[in-house]
Image: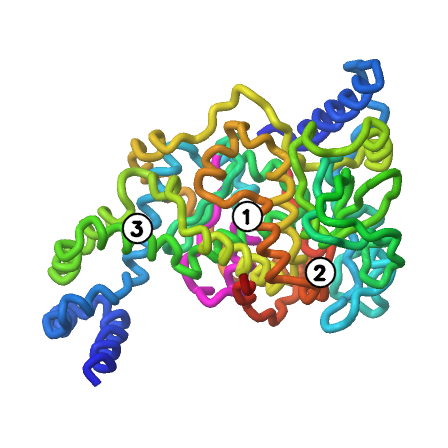
Amino acid sequence: MRAFLCLLLGLLLVGVADAGSLRDKLLEKIPESERLLLGLSEEDEIRAGRQATASLLAVAPLVADEALQRYVNTVGRWIAMGSSRPDLPWRFGVIDSADVNAFSAPGGYVLVTRGLYESLGSEAELAGVLAHEIAHVVERHQVELLRETLLIEEGREAVAKAVRGERRDLVRRLIGTGAELFARRLDQDAEFEADRLGVVLAARAGYSPYGLPAVLQKIATLAPADDRVQLLYKTHPPPEARLRRLDAAMGNAFDKYDRPGAGGKLYRP
Amino acid sequence: MSASSGIAATFLRASLCAVAAALGACSDEQPAHPPTPRAEAPATAPETQGGAPQDGARAARPPGDATAPTPSTAREPALAPAPGTVLRETELKREPSFDAPTLARLPAGTRVIAADREGGWLRVINDGREGWVRLLHVSLQPPGTGGGSAQELESVAKLATGRAGTGNIVSTTGIRGLREEQLRAAAPNEGEVARLEGYAATPEAANAYARKHGLARRDVAELPAPKR
């Protein structure tokens, strides 16, 4: 009964994130151990994601092509609308780096490098890349990693700060320094999960689900020692492992969703 | 932003040059197969929702499909020739379809050269035979690893007929990648993130784009993790 009550209170708190003193009163009643189960509010997620994204943009700014940026936003938004979080303020961008990589941050920020964009052969391949990143945000993979890291490093103090409402400081400490969030390695099961949900999201949006596997194949043709994939390989499983897992998950059942050529024409700068 | 057709052309030239070098000659002039212009809006495949894939998946759209974009003869861009290894026993099909005749069974570990892709199918050369295998049953590799003989590379290059991919990655040296230390040291660029946010698309714009290009939303269940 107590566990149920605490769960109910927890759910209420997530819903009344900004109900000031009511929240504080409720928090006081919940034992510290159970407060650890509370998630970040969506506002916290967005604030954290925005800060990390702004730091990445300091290193690699947006490619100066408005039509390109609007195009990836259109395609990305369409795909995200088929997810369980369609109403996040999704933002997409192509950043000026020769690296072959894509990044996502909590709250709906997705960035693709120019190096990766130039390798794409179709809108379906773009859709596959964006869908994988959207999946990370939908599944809150980075949020979970951040929370675990913070709790391990700061433990009770972090929780106490959350209780006291020092959310800005909490959020800042969650994402770490600068854009280092994007150099962190997620649990590899999280990457496999993002691949699986990614092909599903692409299929839901009307694309062939094989865009993402095709991009993985292209990446695999790059020498591992190529500097442009060193960060990618630091943070992701090797393409072959990902392809094997996707094959095991998709089997032949996904072939009915295959629509080679579906979608618009990939925008070329 | 450099044009990807430039990269593709470079890669194609490099591939052909590698083949030619293997055969004892090399030239830096125009490749035998000049790069084609970028593919136009690719043809839509017939709707296969809920049904078995049709033979000749590259056929024209079904009659009365007024909402689909106009089909053209151009297809999804091909891959540049790349070596690969078969991951699990798979069938070499004559056409990119489960219903197509099986030309051979390729055991795991078989070396192939991949030349082309259509949806979930990869066109490959193995031991002089050409056919299609499931994309997910092969793992591609960097050039110079695994792969086939010079003759196979040459025949695949011919197949590619110069359309070897708008959009292929060329390995280069001398480009310094993003570094963790660099990322850690970065301070937020408020102006740039505000610019990013200014490009966000509305749901209405996204819906309009999808309608215009025949992208129909489909009900697809999430995939569970495969059993180990």
Residue A90 forms part of the magenta stretch: yes
Residue B117 horizontal side relative to residue B155, left or right? left
Q: Residue at x 27, y 74 (%)?
A: A11
Sooner in the amino-acid sequence: mark 2 or mark 1: 1
Which element carries disc 2, helix, strand or loop? Answer: loop
In the picture shown, does residue A140 fall above or below A238? below
Looking at marks 2 and 3 on the same chain, the residue that comes earlier in the sequence is marked by 3
User: Where does the image place residue B161, in percent across and percent down from the top left?
Assistant: 84, 34
**Residue indicated by mark 2:** A258
Q: Please report the residue visible at 52 percent of the width from the left and 53 percent of the height from the top.
A: A132
Callout 1 secondary element: helix
Determine whether, in the image, residue B195 is placed left or right of residue A209: left
Chain letter of the residue beneath label 2 in the structure image: A
Highlighted magenta segment, given as a residue range: A71-95
Residue B2 location (% of width, % of height): 61, 28
- Quick check: can you spot residue A192? yes
Label 3, label 1: how many angstroms apart (C-alpha)?
22 Å
* Label 3 vs 1, first from the N-terminus: 3
Would residue A29 be counted in the magenta stretch?
Answer: no
Residue B189 in the figure: left or right of residue A33: right
Identify whether A28 is placed above or below B150. Answer: below
Label 2 is placed on what type of residue?
Asp
Q: Which mark is residue A48?
A: 3
Instruction: Tell me the quadrant of the picture where the N terminus of chain A can be found.
Output: bottom left
Q: Is residue A151 shown above or below A268?
A: below
Residue at mark 2 to residue at mark 1: CA–CA distance = 22 Å
Residue highlighted by disc 1: A72
**Percent x, y of residue A2:** 19, 82
Foreground pick, A215 / B25: B25
